[in-house]
Image: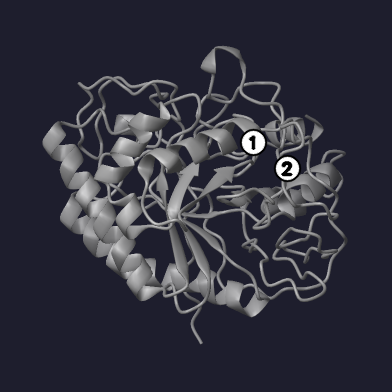
């Protein structure tokens, strides 16, 4: 049987700005006007192979410091390979995880990534064990960041079917909105909203009937001031359609909308934008802190404030990216490969916090924001620094 094409993991968003980019930035997919992001385009990571086969491995060690005053949530065990909570899981050789017991809330680690490639290629490096234990064996998001409608269904299905076989929940990032990153380092996306709508429809066909988490278009809402009012309304309408299509195709799929982070938009402003984008009507909640560093306590409070201002069904929740927030945000709002950061709370669906559905590693730790290296490029120096904190 032929192997399905693999997902593309990069480029990831790198802006995560504390203030929106100038309104003069054009909304074209390849805009080159100034923005708060570096000017370098983000290269694609090496596509992983499809169809993992889990195998036993060593127990995971805990992640780096939470830096959040005890708001690490319910992940009180030793760090289950593909999940969290109080499991005593053992990571698989390629990181998909094989938690013991009846833990039905495990998160999936796709078994091909730049960090796993580096670990496999550098067994004698003195940093390898720490990077493997701290990062490579932990579940993280899988990014779909290139506009390739002919293969997207098979590539999504490769991840979701592998997750089903592992009894785990995949986190999928849909990142193809036209004009993404306002022409910054992660610029690109579909050539237009009609093409994007088609891409999302094809993406949705790969979800299947298992449980999935979809992070819908980082930056697409919080970083929308570079669009005109009409362009923004059209984008938001497309995002609402996307959420409805994803949930119709994947009956157990949860879709989360972009709320920026606690150092960016005021909760009322974020909620107003989310309301325009249909987050309360079509989605399951919001996500915060993707590719940024704000402490979990700050993001938890911010997410709840946004949800309160947003209104909508009582079941709406939030997920927080904790991949690099162990030491909090650096001074001055620096966001592009700042020094002195640390891994945050390990990924988990059991946060122990009301309305906080999950702590996830959406940004892949060790991959550049676009300053230390081209955006999306894995750096063992950066990864080791995060592990050591």
Q: Is residue 88 visible?
A: yes
Find residue 324 and report its horizontal and vertical position in percent: 65, 35
- Badge 2 marks a residue whose secondary structure is loop
- In the rendered image, which quarter is residue 222 located in? top left
- In the rendered image, which quarter is residue 169 located in? bottom right
Q: Earlier in the sequence, mark 1 or mark 2?
A: 2
- The quadrant the C terminus occupies is top right
Task: Judge the density around disc 2: few (<14), some (14-19), many (≥20) Cα neighbours within 10 Å.
Answer: many
In the displayed structure image, the side of residue 199 where residue 232 appears, left or right: left
- Badge 1 marks a residue whose secondary structure is helix
Q: Which residue is mark 1?
A: 296
Q: Are marks 1 and 2 in contact (CB under 8 Å)?
A: yes
Q: Is residue 330 above or below residue 228?
A: above
In the displayed structure image, the side of residue 228 where residue 144 appears, left or right: right
Find residue 27 and report its horizontal and vertical position in percent: 21, 34
In the displayed structure image, the side of residue 53 where residue 46 appears, left or right: left
Extreme residue toward the bottom, this view? 1
Q: Identify the residue shown where x is 70% and y is 38%.
A: 344
Q: Identify the residue shown where x is 29% and y is 59%.
A: 242
- Using the image, tell me which numbered label, if any, was put on residue 72: 2
């Amino acid at each position: 049987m032929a192997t399905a094409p693999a997902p593309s993991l990069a480029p990831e968003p790198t802006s995560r700005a504390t203030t929106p980019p100038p309104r003069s930035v054009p909304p074209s997919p390849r805009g080159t006007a100034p923005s708060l992001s570096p000017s370098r385009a983000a290269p694609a990571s090496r596509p992983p192979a499809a169809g993992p086969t889990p195998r036993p491995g060593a127990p995971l060690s805990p992640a780096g410091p939470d830096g959040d005053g005890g708001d690490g949530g319910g992940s009180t065990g030793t760090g289950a390979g593909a999940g969290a909570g109080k499991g005593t899981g053992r990571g698989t050789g390629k990181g998909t995880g094989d938690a013991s017991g009846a833990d039905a809330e495990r998160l999936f680690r796709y078994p091909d990534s730049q960090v796993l490639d580096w670990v496999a290629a550098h067994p004698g490096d003195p940093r390898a064990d720490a990077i493997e234990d701290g990062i490579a064996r932990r579940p993280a998001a899988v990014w779909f960041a290139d506009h390739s409608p002919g293969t997207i269904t098979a590539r999504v299905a490769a991840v979701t079917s592998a997750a089903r076989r592992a009894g785990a929940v995949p986190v999928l990032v849909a990142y193809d909105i036209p004009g993404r990153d306002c022409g910054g380092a992660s610029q690109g996306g579909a050539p237009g909203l009609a093409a994007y709508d088609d891409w999302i429809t094809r993406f949705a066909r790969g979800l299947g009937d298992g449980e999935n988490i979809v992070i819908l278009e980082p930056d697409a809402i919080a970083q929308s001031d570079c669009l005109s009012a009409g362009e923004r309304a059209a984008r938001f309408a497309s995002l609402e359609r996307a959420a409805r299509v994803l949930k119709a195709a994947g009956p157990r799929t949860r879709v989360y909308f972009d709320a920026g982070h606690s150092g960016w938009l005021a909760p009322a402003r974020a909620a107003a934008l989310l309301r325009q984008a249909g987050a309360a009507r079509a989605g399951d909640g919001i996500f915060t802190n993707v590719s940024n560093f704000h402490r979990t306590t700050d993001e938890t409070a911010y997410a709840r404030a946004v949800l309160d201002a947003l209104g909508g069904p009582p079941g709406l929740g939030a997920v927080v990216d904790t991949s690099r927030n162990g030491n909090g945000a650096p001074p001055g709002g620096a966001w592009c490969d700042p020094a002195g950061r640390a891994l945050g709370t390990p990924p988990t669906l059991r946060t122990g916090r009301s309305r906080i559905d999950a702590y996830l590693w959406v940004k892949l730790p060790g991959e550049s924001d676009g300053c230390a290296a081209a955006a999306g490029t894995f750096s063992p120096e950066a990864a080791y620094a995060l592990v050591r904190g």
